[in-house]
Image (spheres, helix red, strand yellow):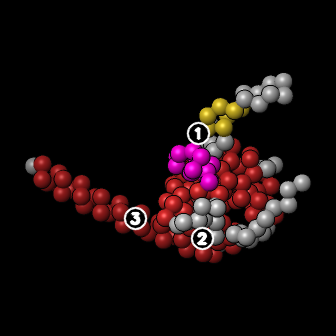
Amino acid sequence: MFRLLVQRLLEHLKVLDKQVDELEGQIVAWHRQNPQSKKLEKIPGISPLTASALIASLGDARNFDSGRQVAAWLGLVPRQHSSGGKQNLLGISKRGDTYLRTLRIHGARIVIHHAGQRADDCSWVNKVVARRNKNIAAVALANKNARTVWALLMHDREYRTDYQSIAG
């Protein structure tokens, strides 16, 4: 009787797995037709699924005043308890969209893993990993990428690895 139950559950799992593959194919097809989603895929750590989820959830980038607001909306910035001009930053808030935050952090972990295999000690990621642990570096990279996503969508630009901002 137990074998029959396990066999039925296994068949049900196979059907669900097939449905997930079909839905993932539909999402990837939508991603290929959306120029904004394709633009975000060029950022390291952002897959077609993550890019399409970001586009679908963010909507218009003009709804946010800054990249920090996007990162805060995703729950990737420290919570603030500030008064009198003195900033007191607490731990990462973990508020916002759990699914998007999870996708962003897992994408950042992949980037950190690949950056650790290369001997490029000058990269921003490797410098953060050297100072902090890999989990904190993953959240920091996810935060940085969320701000990059906002900037690309807001100013209608393409992602460039050699981009240097003009600090004023």
Residue 28: which quarter of the image?
bottom right
Name the element at disc 1: loop
| Residue span colored magenta | 127-142
How far apart are the two marked residues, 2 and 1, measured between alpha carbons? 27 Å
Tell me residue 76's x, y (percent): 63, 45
Q: Residue at x 59, y 57 (%)?
A: 126
Amino acid carrying mark 1 in the image = Lys
Tell me residue 122's x, y (percent): 64, 61
Give the mark, 2 or 3, whose residue is nearer the N terminus. Answer: 3
For residue 57, say whether it is visible: no
Name the element at disc 2: helix
How far apart are the two marked residues, 3 and 1, measured between alpha carbons? 30 Å
For residue 129, say whether it is visible: yes
Q: Is residue 137 magenta?
A: yes
Tell me residue 153's x, y (percent): 75, 62
Q: Is residue 163 magenta?
A: no
Residue depth check, mark 2 versus mark 3: number of the one nearer the observer: 2
Dot 1 alpha-carbon crowd within 10 angstroms: few under 14, some 14 to 19, many 20 or more: some
- Please identify the quadrant where the C terminus is shown: bottom right
Q: Which residue is mark 3?
A: 19
Q: Residue at x 21, y 56 (%)?
A: 8
Tell me residue 2's x, y (percent): 12, 48
Residue depth check, mark 3 versus mark 1: number of the one nearer the observer: 1
Amino acid carrying mark 2 in the image = His
Q: Residue at x 30, y 63 (%)?
A: 14
Q: Which residue is mark 1?
A: 94
- From the viewer's side, name the closer residue of 12 and 107: 107
Dot 2 alpha-carbon crowd within 10 angstroms: few under 14, some 14 to 19, many 20 or more: many
Q: Which residue is mark 2?
A: 31
Q: Residue at x 62, y 54 (%)?
A: 127
Residue depth check, mark 2 versus mark 1: number of the one nearer the observer: 1
